[in-house]
């Protein structure tokens, strides 16, 4: 065991270093790369969100630990490659937070989210990056709904946006019609356009589409489980009409 008297973050770093030791470490941990660990990082972030949605603070503590382990893991691999270490990661985010809050840590009187976005855009413009698009930096690994919203917001900042919610609402009807008339090989593409339009409409109405869909998923799961509980073992053999009746009962029970 590593020394439990160490400061917690130092103990965790020492544990990861030992796991990654090429001679005496864990075979699985040693074999990992940034690419193989990335899916676990995404998964742990979603599990943090799930614990928050369930208001389970004990689970949230554990899930935040799992997410922190991902940061430690990536930082350790970078340190081994001579790129950066955990201290550099912590320093970079500390510098960024101070830089993007000049009304708190500097001499700017104004502040707020608009200033954060302005400073963020200035930082992107100052980088030696060939990609000067307003859409640059929207991560490919984001969930599709979240990435669609971020792309739309970026485009809106440079004036490419509907003036009000009637535009994206009409676009939904347009995309539905295109799906109905599309050849089979184009249907998936047109459904993607429809989802993109729905995200745009939600954005114009001030609704977070990822949260809205998460809520819809939870509602469906809750009602479906109620249906199963009502029919017990007989549920799979019921007709569709009988299952629909159970669905309506589960729905009515929530009113």
Image: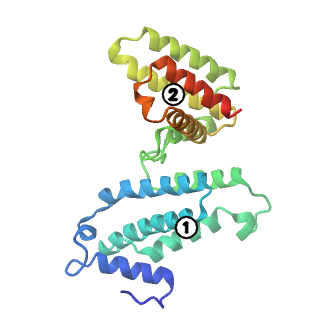
Q: Considering only vertical position in the picture, is 183 above or below 6?
A: above
Can I make out residue 248 in this image? yes
Residue 95, by quadrant, is: bottom right
User: Which residue is farthest right?
Assistant: 109
In percent of width and height, residue 207 lies at: 66, 37
Residue at image x 69%, y 32%?
205
* Image quadrant occupied by the N terminus: bottom left
Q: Residues within 10 Å of mark 2 (few under 14, many from 20)?
A: some
Residue at image x 55%, y 62%?
60
In percent of width and height, residue 247 lies at: 56, 27
Residue at image x 48%, y 79%?
9
Image-based side of 171 in relation to 106, left or right: left
- Observer-nearest residue: 8 or 192? 8
Element at label 1: helix
In percent of width and height, residue 31 lies at: 23, 66
Element at label 2: helix
Which residue is identified by label 2? Answer: 195
Q: Considering only vertical position in the picture, is 66 above or below 11?
A: above
* Image quadrant occupied by the C terminus: top right
Residue 166, by quadrant, is: top right
In the image, which disc is placed on residue 61? 1
Residue at image x 67%, y 28%?
252
Query: Considering only order in the chain, which callout, 1 or 2, is on the residue closer to the N terminus?
Result: 1
Image-based side of 168 in relation to 42, left or right: right
Can I make out residue 106 in this image? no
- Observer-nearest residue: 25 or 123? 25
- Calculate the distance from the C-alpha at mark 2 to the C-alpha at mark 1: 34 Å
- Observer-nearest residue: 60 or 19? 60
In percent of width and height, residue 227 lies at: 53, 32
């Amino acid at each position: 065991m590593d020394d439990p008297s160490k400061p917690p973050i130092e103990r965790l770093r020492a544990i990861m270093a030992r796991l990654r030791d090429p001679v005496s470490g864990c075979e699985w941990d040693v074999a990992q790369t940034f690419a193989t660990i990335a899916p676990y990082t995404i998964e742990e972030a979603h599990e943090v969100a799930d614990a928050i949605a369930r208001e389970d603070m004990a689970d949230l503590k554990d899930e935040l630990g799992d997410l922190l382990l991902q940061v430690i893991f990536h930082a350790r691999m970078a340190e081994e490659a001579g790129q950066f270490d955990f201290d550099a990661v912590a320093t970079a985010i500390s510098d960024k937070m101070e830089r993007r809050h000049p009304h708190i840590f500097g001499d700017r009187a104004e502040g707020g989210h608009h200033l954060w976005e302005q400073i963020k855009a200035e930082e992107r413009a100052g980088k030696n990056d060939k990609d000067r698009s307003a859409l640059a930096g929207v991560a490919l690994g984001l969930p599709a709904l979240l990435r669609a919203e971020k792309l739309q917001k970026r485009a809106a900042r440079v004036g490419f946006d509907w003036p009000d919610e009637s535009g994206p609402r009409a676009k939904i009807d347009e995309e539905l019609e295109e799906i109905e008339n599309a050849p089979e090989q184009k249907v998936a593409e047109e459904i993607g356009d429809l989802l993109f339009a729905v995200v745009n409409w939600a954005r114009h109405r001030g609704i977070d589409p990822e949260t809205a869909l998460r809520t819809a998923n939870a509602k469906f799961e809750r009602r479906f489980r109620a249906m199963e509980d009502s029919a017990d073992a007989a549920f799979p053999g019921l007709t569709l009409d009988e299952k629909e009746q159970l669905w309506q009962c589960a729905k009515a029970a929530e009113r």
